[in-house]
Image (cartoon, rainbow, N blue to C red):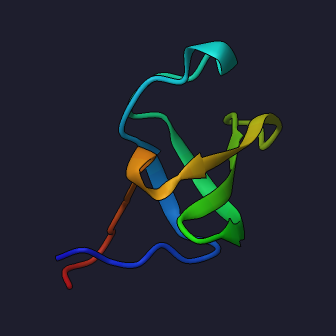
Amino acid sequence: MNKEICVLDVVALTEDVPDRGLLRGQVGTVVESLGSGVFEVEFVDNDGLTYAMLPLKSSQLLVLHYQPA
């Protein structure tokens, strides 16, 4: 089941983003839709401090689910 990505979805990276020091599997939150299939994603540490915020394509993201569909 493919869910369309929405603002405030919790997502994981499906690939490394080496120029930003991000690894596949890191978890972030979609904070804005920038256009067709492109989203601004914020990555925060355990203290709630942002360590990266960048635009990513939907193909680079996996929406995480916490409950059965």
The residue at 16%/76% (across/down) is 1
In which quadrant of the rendered view does residue 45 lie?
top right
The residue at 39%/34% (across/down) is 25
How many numbered circles are shown? 0
Viewer-proximal residue among 9 and 16: 16
1 relative position to 9: left or right:
left
Viewer-proximal residue among 20 and 9: 20
Residue 26 x/y as whole percent: 48, 34
In which quadrant of the rendered view does residue 65 lie?
bottom left
In the picture, the quarter occupied by the C terminus is bottom left
The residue at 54%/24% (across/down) is 17
In the rendered image, the residue lying farthest to the front is 36
Residue 48 x/y as whole percent: 78, 43
The residue at 59%/47% (across/down) is 56
17 relative position to 58: left or right:
right
Q: Is residue 25 above or below residue 60?
A: above
66 relative position to 38: left or right:
left
In the rendered image, the residue lying farthest to the bottom is 69
Residue 49 x/y as whole percent: 83, 38
In which quadrant of the rendered view does residue 15 lie?
top left
Q: Is residue 57 above or below residue 38?
A: above
Viewer-proximal residue among 26 and 34: 34
Viewer-proximal residue among 69 and 62: 62
62 relative position to 48: left or right:
left
Residue 14 x/y as whole percent: 36, 39
